[in-house]
Amino acid sequence: MSLSDAEYHAKAHALLAAVETQIDAWLEADLVDIDTHRTGGLLELSLPGGSKIVLNTQPPLQEIWMAARAGGYHFKWQGEAWVDTREGHEFGALLSRCASEQAGVALSFKL
């Protein structure tokens, strides 16, 4: 399913904003200390222990890319969710798994 450029930008922006909102809620609840830094379509998560997860929009491909300790992943919009192009994992589930492993605490992104 192909999105218009405007639809892609809206969905990608909403996804990054939802990630930031979830992390802000965890900071408020003192659950985990994750710093975020956003520059345009790039969102960097600095996790406890010094590791990072980088989320990056790729407008020409209409993808979201995630770089984590476990590897690099590309996600495309599949009608209802952002889905990994290689193994079919949903973005929120895979981000939750990677962030939990890197932070050392169970985290669940509800996106």
Image (cartoon, helix red, strand yellow):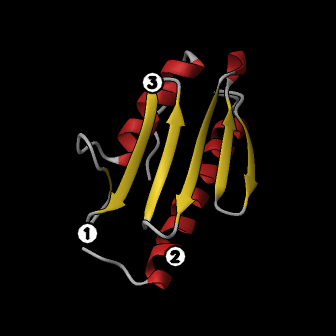
Sequence-earlier tag: 3 or 2? 2
Q: Nearer the viewer, residue 47 or 33?
A: 47
The residue sitting at 52% across, 31% down in the picture is 68
Q: Choose the circle earlier in sequence order: 3 or 1.
A: 3
Circle 2 sits on which residue?
10
- The part of the image, by quadrant, that contains residue 39 is bottom right
How many marks on residues? 3
- Mark 3 crowd level (few <14, some 14–19, many ≥20, 10 Å Cα): few
Residue at image position (51%, 65%) is 12
Q: CA distance from mark 3 to mark 2?
A: 28 Å
Quarter of the figure with residue 23 = top right
Residue 110 visible (yes or no):
yes
Disc 3 marks a residue whose amino acid type is Ala
Q: CA distance from mark 3 to mark 1?
A: 26 Å
Tag 3 and tag 2, C-beta contact below 8 Å: no
Q: Check contact, mark 1 vs mark 2: CB within 8 A.
A: no
The crowding category of the residue bearing disc 2, from other C-alpha atoms within 10 Å (few below 14, some 14 to 19, many at least 20), is: few
How would you rate the neighbour count of disc 1 (Cα within 10 Å): few for under 14, some for 14-19, many for 20 or more?
few
Comparing labels 3 and 2, the label whose residue is closer to the camera: 3
**In terms of secondary structure, where does tag 3 sit?**
loop
On the image, the x and y values in percent for residue 98 come to 47, 28
Picture residue at 68% right of the left edge, 43% below the top: 44
Dot 1: element:
loop
| Residue corresponding to mark 3 | 70
Q: Amino acid at mark 2?
A: Ala
Closer to the chain start, of discs 1 and 2, is 2
Which disc number belongs to residue 79? Answer: 1
Q: Quadrant of the N terminus?
A: bottom left
Of the numbered discs in the image, which one, if any, rests on residue 61? none
